Amino acid sequence: MRRCRMSAPALPLPVEIVGRSEEAAGIFTLHLRLPTPEQRAVYCFLPGQFNMLYLPAVGEVPISLSSDPEDEILGHTVRSAGRVTRALARLQPGEYLGVRGPYGRGWPLQEAGGRDVVIVTGGLGCAPVLAVVHYVLRRRKSFGRLVVIQGVKHSRDLLWPQAYQEWARQPDTQVLVAADAGEPLWPWHVGSAIPLIEQAVFDTDHALAMLCGPEGMMVAAARALAARGLAESAIYLSMERNMQCAVGLCGHCQLGGKFVCRDGPVFRYPEVKFLLERGGL
């Protein structure tokens, strides 16, 4: 599985917004299409990589791809939280924005082939692994069991609740969801998602884990998975930092001696284990 990059990574391409989905309050997905058949034919990405979305006179922001790599339409799920993302939230189908990418290191799906895949996510930051779920379910015979563990602060924060129910009905798939606070009729666990790792059914000798979410949650999840007997080298994390240039030049996303935009955002746990939860890094 090759590392995908566009031919001119520093120059944004104009792309059309062909669809827009409201996922929750302040969270939306932009469905983008590259302008020509030739560009669509050569563009490729790996789940876990990201694009830089650009608006003239506003700025640009890194956004993970949430669609399947074989989809012609590129999905980007965005949380409206800053100047650029608020401007993106005002865009409608038929309008254009700039895209450059994909950038970074994606999830190790080639290494995961034939193995159980355990996904642990926290908060609203599940878009980087959404593409993994799509990828595995569309190629079900190429992987072992799929376990999806998702934790949110409040039950209303869960994006795509119907999708989680649909995933749970798929063969060899286990879905465990937790909310620190649940509304009436909340069908899943109330409390932290970390204890749900004990309920996960997977072969620790033939599994690979992918973690995404707040740093403290990922640390706790990695420790819980290691306590289950999963090798630390089989645990991967998607890190978040202030990525501005996407090519490791500006230094804003430096994590120790690494740059999240260039060396990540996906890291093997031992690579960053001693850099996590340390101020100033």
Image (tube, rainbow, N blue to C red):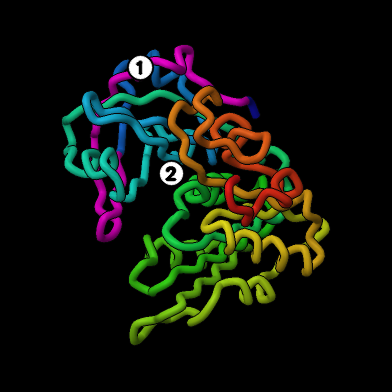
Image point 33% across, 23% down: which residue? 34
Check the image and report above or below for 115 versus 40. Answer: below
- Mark-to-mark CA distance, 1 and 2: 21 Å
Find disc 1 in the rendering and name its residue: 37
Dot 2: few (<14), some (14–19), or many (≥20) neighbours within 10 Å? Answer: many
Image point 51% across, 30% down: which residue? 45
Dot 1: few (<14), some (14–19), or many (≥20) neighbours within 10 Å? Answer: few
* 252 horizontally vs 276: left or right: left
Find disc 2 in the rendering and name its residue: 66
Quadrant where the C terminus sits is top right
Is residue 245 or residue 229 the one in the foreground? Answer: 245
| Magenta run includes residue 104 | no
Q: Position of residue 146 (x, y in %)?
A: 62, 59
Label 1: state its secondary structure. Answer: helix
Q: Bounds of the magenta span?
A: 3-30
Quadrant where the N terminus sits is top right
Q: Where is residue 4 in the image (x, y as percent from the top left)?
A: 55, 24
* 223 horizontally vs 46: left or right: right
Which sits earlier in the primary sequence, circle 1 or circle 2?
A: 1
| Magenta run includes residue 10 | yes
* 148 horizontally vs 198: left or right: left
Give the amino acid at mark 2: Ser
